[in-house]
Amino acid sequence: MKKSIVLLFAVLSLSAAYAQDSKYEAAMKPLVAEIHATHFENSLTEVSNKMERIATAESNAWLPNYWVAYCNIVDAFSEKDSDKKDLMLDKAEKYVGKAAKLSKNNDEIEQLTAYMYNAKLAASPMTGWMRYGSKIEEHIAAAKKINPNNPRTALLEAESVYYTPSTFGGGKEKAKPMLEKAKSSFGKFTPKNDLMPNWGEGNVDYYLSQY
Amino acid sequence: MKQLLLLTFILASFWGKSQTIISGEVLQKNGEPIPFVNVQLDGTYNGASAEENGQFSFTTSETGKATVSFTMVGFLPFSQSVELNGNPVKLNVTMKEEINALNAVVITAGTFEASDRNKMVMLKPLDIVTTAGGQADITAVMQLLPGANRVGETEGLFVRGGSASETKTVIDGMIVQNPFFSSTPDVPQRGRFSPFMFKGTAFSTGGYSAQYGQALSSVLLLDTQDKMGSNSNWNINANLAGVSGSYTHKGWLTATAGYTNLSPFFSMIKTNLDFQEVPNGLGGSITINENINERSVVKAYATVPENNSGLRLPTYDADNSTYLFTNRNRNFFSNGSFKTFSEDGKWGLQTGLSYSNNIDELQIADNAADRTDERTQTRIMGNYYFGNNLSSALTVGGEFHHIKVGNIYNQFDLNMTDNYSAAFAESEFYLSSKLALKPGVRIEHSSVINKSNIAPRLSMAYKLGKYDQFSLAAGRFYQNPEKEYLYLNKSLDFEVADHLILNYQIIKNLRTFRVEAFYKDYKNLVTEATNSFDPNPYRFPIGETQNDGFGYAQGFDVFYRDQTTIKNADVWITYSYLDTERKFRNYPKQVKPFFASKHNFSLVYKHFFVEPSLNIGATFTHTSGRPFYRFNDTFQDVNETPNFQNLSISISKIKKVNNHFLVFYAALDNVLARQNVFGYRFSADGKESFEVRPPVYRTFFCGFSWSIGELNRTPKEAGLDI
């Protein structure tokens, strides 16, 4: 009898652990799906809050932190109030930092860090280059080193060339082959699972439609 | 049976939980709801976002004691403990607004800052190098700002009725003994430091912090660049004044070497100077800048320039004769600092060490003369951060300087050693995001005069609306008498100035307006008893000296900047009004000093043409006449020099090809070749007067900078279109 109780305990605790895992997945899945289905037109505040609650409860999971940062970056792009925009990007910086602490050598986190600095640069174009220019390059380089085929890194690189004036080595024409390359690497990309980042192809399509 | 009971119990604890409803509303202090607040039961996924009206509601199956947390961007996090037992929990919460860089009032009275630090700053670091007529010289650009008085014949910052010696230049907290190239009579000198070295420049026009001392009028605070990236690159600079090259290794180490020779510059233009040896020099510097970890920074800088020049200066006599003035200058400046923060961000520590040594081997006509000075200094400062979002700070620190200066002129050998020590305490605290107070006190001791002082300081700021604020600064400022007086009289006392400054500023939609009024009261200024008045500013004071001088300065200044009305253009307009009189030096009574002009006006215009990526700038300045006093002047009526006016233009073009970054620049100073007069010098008998003129009426300057390799900092022009 004693044995069976021990066994029962073992089964119960295992199932509890499993329940915990599946609870995490069950909570994350619809949120990630919602994020992937939203293209700038709707605010992600609600989703971000839910992600933030998961991030707080699951202190070892990098993904919810990643997604909180992502939501804030995307929402910041459409935020008109410059103070609010700065606060949202500061929050994104904090969460992408948390994610980086939990998962080392992660190309998606490096890419998002560069994306976040890029958003900060766009928020203060006059001084942004001085402060963020080299940080963006640094994190893009780190992301490429870990995974040269990450399509989001390719997108970010193409995007910054797209917006750089031709006198400074950028321009729309120069960005075109880079966008096409990004498009093809999106074609080859499959995320490891449903919780992982799989955004950005829409952005490439948008830029390609501008030619 | 027992086991079965236990099993049921265990199962019940897994599946038989009761549900509790947690609801309520979240409001600001003023009763307004805060939408989208994230409400969470700690350790669980349970929670909700507040609605537009601040209401929230969620259920949880947890039981017992728990904590509900409320978080929202821009507000301080809040948590509340609750007891979960199935009965509904109602929480009405008030969240406090967080004080942060975006909403906090900033103490601005008496400070004109160029940095990225906060939203209330007037200028960005790059504005300094892109200003026409500024010659990429920090001081020259500061002279275009409110509160500065342009004085053409000598280097230095003359601030609100103060002489150049009343302004101290400070790099990373350390006083710079020789901020300018060695002085030559009536030939103004450039600053020794390139504006590219600094991430922030704060020009204080008075009422400055207790962290600094030994300046009656002003401090110019320069903060060196932080490490920005880890790229290696080369840079080559060539212009009409010389060539220099530098190499940056992985972003942390930079070595620079340069050779200056003004021959090409002077060969192209007509100069009012008669050179025996055109200024030339050789120099090098090393900069180390490393982030030891995320919270600690180490910086070190050392530079060894040497400069030589020889020119024939007028003797100021009826024959228009001249004498030879040569200078071999050897200079060394080093500065090291360490800065660290604790992990929780509550504690900060800064230490610094600096050594400088300067030797001027002068030949004045047939007389050999040496000027030497040496300063060793160390500084330590601790910060404790507290309050709402750690916005308030308590700062305590101290510094020690060992200063040796000497002057040899033929048989005269004068020297002086001072051990100067100071301690300071200051607290900047935020009573709310709208109101900040900064009281401070500084205690100093100087061994050469064996005297001590206590200087209280107070500044504050109050935010009126989202974009505008009032600020006030007051305090007492002490300074040792100038060394020329101390050589002969070591029983002198500190000179004293009291400041009161009131400032209003509004920054909205890329437009800035700032107005500041001030009153300064001078006491204990050094005076020299002489039989008759000699106006020569370069004479050595040999009369009896004491601290019975006094004076005042009052006025206001206005600054307006517009970066939006004209697309891609940036306009600044500055006007300063100054009313000042003082009895000091060898002045027999209280009069307007020779360096003060009533009106200073400047207009700076910059335009960026995106298509050819061209920067064009123009600067116009107007300075009303300054008083001058004659030999044996009776000081009955005041004569003034003519007004000073200058129009400068500059143009620069940027080109990036792969890893090569090129900047071409050209500047024309005093486009209209106006024959400005800075003052007059008199013959020894006082009968003849001579104009003091600028070295060159119209100057043309051009050059280029070529960088190879990935840059750690990209100029702002590269990002304009984003």
Image: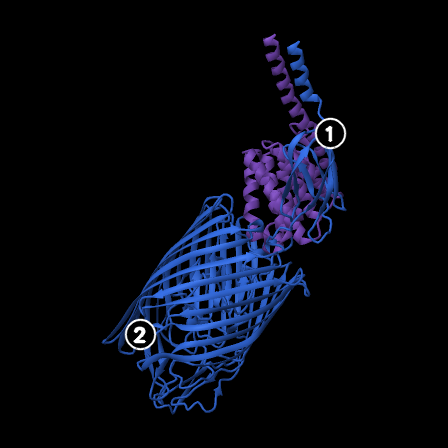
**Residue A36 vertical placement versus B470 (above, below):** above
| Residue B435: x %, y % from top left | 60, 60
Of residue B33 and residue B219, the one placed in the foreground of this image is B33
- In the picture provided, is B464 more to the left or to the right than A141? right
Of residue B319 and residue B298, the one placed in the foreground of this image is B298
Q: Which numbered circle lies on residue B19?
A: 1
> Can you identify the residue that label 2 sits on?
B491
| Residue B492: x %, y % from top left | 33, 74
Q: Which numbered circle lies on residue A206?
A: none
Q: Chain of mark 1?
A: B
Picture colour for chain A: purple
- In the picture provided, is B493 more to the left or to the right than B698? left
Kindly give the residue lying farthest to the left in the view shown: B411
- In the picture provided, is B160 more to the left or to the right than A15? left
Picture colour for chain B: blue
Under circle 1, the secondary element is loop
Of residue B344 and residue A129, the one placed in the foreground of this image is B344
